[in-house]
């Protein structure tokens, strides 16, 4: 997962798993590498970051999150 705009900084003090690896990039973005089960709770956690997180891998999770966000955008683009 890549975090933008300061999101994910809390993971330095509150890891989501013992095997997580955080890398602070030169532009301030944060890359998280972690091995966790892909549960609905984990997906909910990811989606909670909105546009400040991007799933880079695994591809199946990336595609699912992309699809969910596309549905949300389409709902917001509808006329009321």
Image (spheres, rainbow, N blue to C red):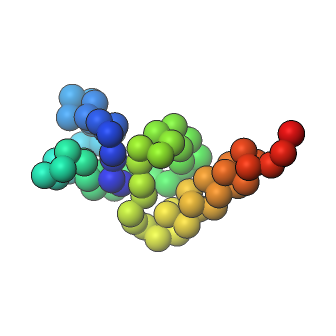
Quadrant in which the C terminus is drawn: top right
For the point 56% across and 57% down, which residue is it? 65
Q: Please state the total of marks drawn on the protein image.
A: 0
- Residue 28 lies, in percent from the top left, at 20, 45
Residue at the image point whose x is 21% and y is 29% from the top: 13
Find the residue positioned furthest to the front: 79
Q: Nearer the viewer, residue 28 or 39?
A: 28
> In the rendered image, which quarter is residue 66 located in?
bottom right
State whether residue 67 is above or below residue 80: below
Q: In this view, does 47 lie to the left or right of 20?
A: right
Q: On the rendered structure, is 39 left or right of 73?
A: left
| Residue 56 lies in quadrant | bottom left
Residue 45 in sight? no
Res 25 seen here: yes
Q: Residue at the location (24% across, 43% down)?
A: 18
Image coordinates of residue 73 in percent, x first then y, are 67, 51
8 vs 44, left or right, is: left
Q: Where is residue 27 in the image (x, y as percent from the top left)?
A: 18, 50
Rendered residue at 36%/54% (across/down): 1
């Amino acid at each position: 997962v890549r975090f933008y705009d300061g999101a994910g900084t809390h993971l330095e003090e509150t890891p989501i798993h013992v095997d997580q690896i955080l890398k602070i990039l030169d532009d301030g973005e944060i890359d998280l590498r972690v091995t966790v089960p892909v549960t609905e709770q984990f997906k909910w956690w990811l989606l909670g970051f909105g546009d400040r997180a991007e799933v880079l891998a695994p591809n199946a999770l990336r595609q699912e999150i992309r699809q969910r966000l596309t549905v949300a955008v389409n709902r917001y683009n509808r006329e009321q």
